[in-house]
Image: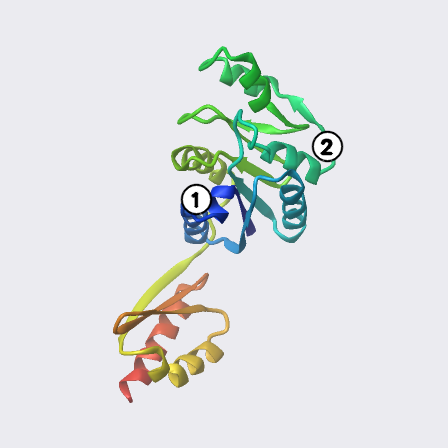
Amino acid sequence: MDFIIVSVGNELLSGDITNSNAAYMAKKLVQIGHRVRRIIVVPDDVEEIAEEVSEASKKADFVLVTGGLGATHDDVTAEGVARAFGVNLELNEEAVRLLRKITDNEEAIRKVASLPEGSEVIPNDKGAAPAFIVKNVAVMPGVPAEMEDTFEKILRKFSKERYFEDILRVNGYEEKILKELNTVVKEFEDVEIGSYPKPGYVVIKFSGKDENRVREAKKKLEKLLKSL
């Protein structure tokens, strides 16, 4: 399946925090054979959230949104997602029930439990705001521990597909192996081949659904490099 990740938060755009949530989800998805088509970061703005989620839901099989769930003024993700699908926010009784286990602040409960119509609630065992799924979009809290807790529950809904990867470390610099690398890339179009320069060496990553093809691509590059 194809996924798009949408991270919400002014703090991400200002550089105050690193987008570790997106990296965590992308890694987990790829490891079970799915593809992340893009990662988008948007501010705490209803219209921008609505626009990006609406477009993402059309381009990907499933969309994962993090951040902006809570009781403060800048927690507007639920409203943005509702607007993306042209539905209203409604007080979700399941969310209310979960929240009343940890707080008696009715104002906060009503804010956090107001979710897009038709939402499926995903319990948050590490914090307050529950995650939710509406249509092909899952929305999770932005606090990493809470995101991981709810994401792992959502991840169980997706099948594990075939995926294999292998790594080759090559001493030196990228430009010295470009010809050989491009030869392998052209021959193994069904294998994802990534080149990641490091200080004094290059890491070549081979990945795909066919283990034999992944291994063959690595061996082919090793063979070509031996002739240098």
Farthest residue, direction bottom: 227
The percent position of residue 215, horizontal first and vertical second, equals 36, 69
Q: Quadrant of the C terminus?
A: bottom left
Please say which color scheme the image uses.
rainbow
Q: For this view, does 78 lie left or right of residue 204?
A: right
Give 68 or 215, whichever is nearer the viewer. Answer: 68
Q: Is 92 rendered above or below residue 77?
A: above
Q: Secondary structure at mark 2?
A: loop
The residue lying at 46 percent from left, 75 percent from top is 188
Q: In terms of secondary structure, where does tag 1 sit? A: helix
Mark 2 burial class by Cα count in 10 Å: few <14, some 14-19, many 20+ = some
Q: CA distance from mark 2 to mark 1?
A: 27 Å
Residue 146 figure quarter: top left
Residue 214: x percent and y percent? 39, 68
In the image, what residue type sits under mark 2?
Val
Contact, mark 2 vs mark 1 (Cβ under 8 Å): no
Q: Identify the residue shown where x is 63% and y is 48%.
A: 52
Within the image, what quadrant is residue 73 found in? top right
- Tell which of 94 and 21 is nearer to you: 21
What percent of the width, then of the height, locates residue 191?
Answer: 46, 69
What residue does disc 2 label?
Answer: 87
Can you say whether 123 is above or below 2 in the image? above
**Which residue carries the number 1 mark?**
21
- Position of 49 with respect to 227 (left or right) is right
Seen in the picture, residue 15 relative to 194 is either above or below; the reply is: above
Q: Amino acid at mark 1?
A: Asn
In the rendered image, residue 179, in percent from the top left (x then y), is placed at 40, 85
Q: Please report whichever mark, 2 or 1, sits nearer to the chain's N-terminal start.
A: 1
Instruction: Give the total number of marks visible in the rendering.
Output: 2
